[in-house]
Image (cartoon, rainbow, N blue to C red):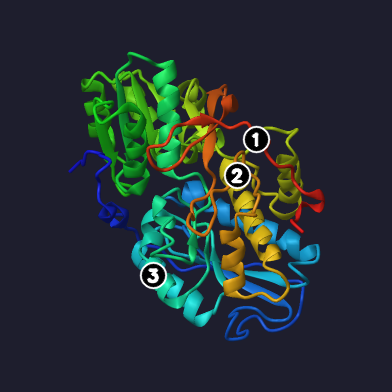
Amino acid sequence: MNRTLRSRASRAWARTATGIATTVTIAVTTTACGGAGGGSESAPGVTGDTIKIGSTQPLTGPVAPGYAKMSKAMAAYFNYVNDNGGVHGRSIDFVVEDDGYNPTKTAEKTRKLVLKDKVFALVGAFGTAPHTAVLDFIRQNKVPDLFPSSGSVSWNQPDIYPDTFGWQTDYIREGKVLASYVKENFAGKTVCAFGQGDDLGADGVKGVETVLGKDGLKASEAYTATNPDVKAQIGKLQASGCEVVVSFSSPGFTALALGTSAKLGFKAQWVVVSIGSDPVGLTGYLKDDAAALTNGLISSTFLPLPTDADNSWIKLFTTINNEYNEEQGLDSIVLYGYALAYSAVEALQAAGKDLTREGLLKVLGSGDLVGPGLTPFAFSADDHSGFIGTAMTRITDLKAEIISPVYVTDDGDGPVEKYDGVAPQAPKGGISK
C-alpha cells in the first residue's frame, strides 16, 4: 500500500527498510606495525601506532549498486593518509561491516564494531533507517559517531545523542533551498513531491512546506526502498496535474521515477535531492536512455561538482583516486566518500596526539572544523548538524553544472539566504594539519 508523504510523518518511517545481506568485513591496510585493538580505557581502539575506526555500509542489498563504492573511497583516502604520515604518526585501521541496508544487521554489526573490534569511533555509517536503529546503543556506549551518511535531522539531537554529529546538509535545509528555487523560478506551476518513505522523504517535504506552505504541494507520494514498482505513485502524480515534482529519492528510485514517467507520458520538471541526482549513477540505471531522461533535471550540491577540474578539492581527490581507487571514476558518491573521510581526519588531527573520545567530541563541538564543502558546518556544542546549505544544479547532456549562488538556511523556519563566504581550498598535501 502506498503512503502519502507528509511532514508530520513519524520517525517510525525510518525503520521500514528491510533486506538480507551476507557479512563482509573490509579493513584498510595499515603501514605501521603494532596492536590493532585495545587501547587505554579512555581511548579504546587507539594504540601507539594505530587508530581503529569502523563503519556499517551497504556492500550488498537494495542500495548497494548506488552506494557500495562510497566506503571504497573512504578507505582510499585513509590509505593515502597512512602513506603520508598518518594522524600524528598513527595509521588508520578502517573496518567496514556490510549491513545490507538492513537495520537488524546494522545493530548486529555495530555491536561487533564497538564491543568486539573496540573501535575508537564510528565514521560515515550509512543510511537513515539503519543508523537510527543503533543511536541508543551508541549513546549507551559513548562512542563518537562521526558523520552518518544521511541528511536526517536525527543526527542533530545533542541533548539526547551527544556523541553523534551529522555531516551532509540535512534534508530539511535542502528541501527549503529546493523549494525556494521552485518558488522563484516556477511560480504558478502545480508543485508535488515524491520521496522515500522514511526521514529522507518526510524531512525533505517538511523543508518544502516550510517555504511553500502546508498547501503548497498539490500531491505527495512515497515509495518503499524494497519495492521497485513506482507506477502507482507516478500515476497519481500525473493524475493530480503535477507540473513540478520535488523528489527526495535515492539514485535508483530517481531513475525508476524518470523511466516510469516516460512510459506513462508524464512530463514534469523534476527537482531532485542531491543524493539522488548524480549523472554517472543515473546513467548506470538508465543506460542508453539516460541523456534524454535526465536532460534539464534540477538538483543541488553541498560539495564542489566532481567535473570541476579546476577546483582544488577535485584535483586532490582525483589524484588520490587515480592511485588508490583506480577502478572507480570520481562521481558524486565517490566524492562524498573522499570528502567525508577528509573531514574525519581533520577532526582526528585537531583532537591532538593524546587522543581521547572526549577530546574528539570537544573538537567537533568547537565549531572550528572547516571541511571541503561549499558552506561552513553548523557545529557547536548545541548544534550537531553538518553543512548548512547548497547550490542549485542542472543536468545537461549528462553533466551537472551549478546554476545559482550558494544558499544557506537553518532546519527551522528561518529564511533561505545567499551565502557570501568563500569556500575553503584543499590544504597542501591533502591532509589537514
Residue lying furthest left in this view? 1
Q: Are marks 2 and 1 in contact (CB under 8 Å)?
A: yes
Which sits in the foreground, 303 or 364? 364
Q: Which residue lies furthest to the top in this view?
A: 188
Which quadrant of the view contains residue 401? top right
Q: What percent of the width, then of the height, locates residue 20?
A: 36, 62
> Which amino acid type is shown beneath numbered disc 2?
Pro
- Mark in front: 1 vs 3: 1
Please say whether residue 420 is visible from this viewpoint: yes
Q: Residue 107 carries which label?
A: 3
Which tag is nearer the camera, tag 3 or tag 2?
Answer: 2
**What amino acid is labelled 1 in the image?**
Gly
Q: On the rendered structure, is 274 left or right of 21?
A: right
What amino acid is labelled 3 in the image? Ala
Which quadrant of the rendered structure holds the C terminus?
bottom right
- The residue indicated by pointer 2 is 376
